[in-house]
Amino acid sequence: MAKSVILDMDPGIDDAAAIAVAVNRPDLDIKLITAVAGNVSVDKTTLNVLKLLEFFDKDIPVASGAKAPLKREFVDASYIHGESGMPGYDFPEVTTKPLDVDAVEAIHDVLTHSEEPITIIATGAYTNLALLLQQYPEDKAYIKEFILMGGSISGGNVSSVAEFNVFTDPDAAAIVFESGLPITMIGLDVTLKALLTTETINALPDLGEAGKMLYGIVTAYEDVHDGGKPMHDVNTILYAVDSSVIKTEALAVDVVTDGPAAGATVADTQHRWHEDGFTNVNVGVDIDAHAFNKWFLEQVDEMNK
């Protein structure tokens, strides 16, 4: 039976790759995709979701969400993802539109009309999720789990301690992490190990039009590391369909919301702040990078069938 899922994203190139994989997985029943300001502004992230759904000819509702963090000024990552958020491929003009209701209302509607609890996979700032929890706290009963791309217990990518999604809206992240719901955090501890190698990237154009599209946007991606490029958000989809491939640890994690460490996700491994035995987050800590590359190419190959 397919897993019922809501995707909350800010495409963004790695989000785009995650959407491409997710919408082509028969074991994922995607009820809704919501967009949030993050890698680029929310009007652009919403448009990018629509571009991808039209590219793959998928009829999935889309809702546009928060334009800015809860308390902070919005700062995007267009220096990494390009001005549009999804450069490198010439998508046609979109012919579809998002829903008339905003992301929070759309998520609330899907949750309350579902026959089973729904997994929410979030790969941008968690502003939409925090607003949902604030406005509809009763909806926690309808959420099976959060699978989040974000955070790190070993160092950041926008500061020495903070990962971008959490850093963008740490106040929202704190609300989500303190929700009491099951949370799996797939952060930099995993995603900076699961780099797409040059060999993998160069194999994409031979995998049909989907491969050519992904090759175009991935090669435009400015998140470059020694050994390849991280497809951060794709790891959440892998975990959703096969949790065994990512090693996790149950930890007590707090989000720092102010000061020079704002956006840090701190694992209280010595239980200085929490009682022994308390955990609130299932933290991804390791992955087989070779297996990830192989799996990613298999997913792209399947998109053309």
Image: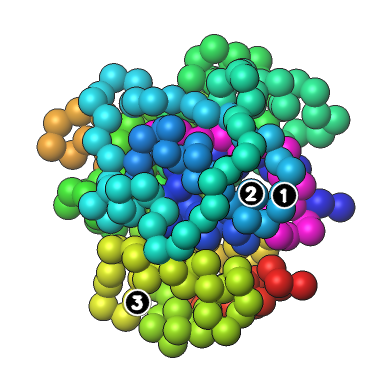
Mark 3 or mark 2, which has the lower sequence index?
2
Mark 1 nearby-residue class (10 Å; few <14, some 14–19, many ≥20): few
| Residue 53 numbered mark, or none | 2
Q: Is residue 134 above or below residue 7?
A: above
Residue 146 shows in the view: no
Q: Nearer the viewer, mark 1 or mark 3?
A: 1
Which range is magenta? Answer: 23-37
Numbered disc 3: secondary structure: loop
| Residue 58 numbered mark, or none | 1
Q: Nearer the viewer, residue 79 or 273?
A: 79
Could you tell me which residue is drawn at 56 percent across and 73 percent down?
Answer: 211
The percent position of residue 246, horizontal first and vertical second, equals: 55, 65
Q: Amino acid at mark 1?
A: Lys
Mark 3 nearby-residue class (10 Å; few <14, some 14–19, many ≥20): some
Residue 246 shows in the view: yes
Spatial CA span between label 3 and label 2: 27 Å
Could you tell me which residue is drawn at 54 percent across and 12 percent down?
Answer: 135
Numbered disc 1: secondary structure: loop
| Residue 228 numbered mark, or none | 3
Mark 1 or mark 3, which has the lower sequence index?
1
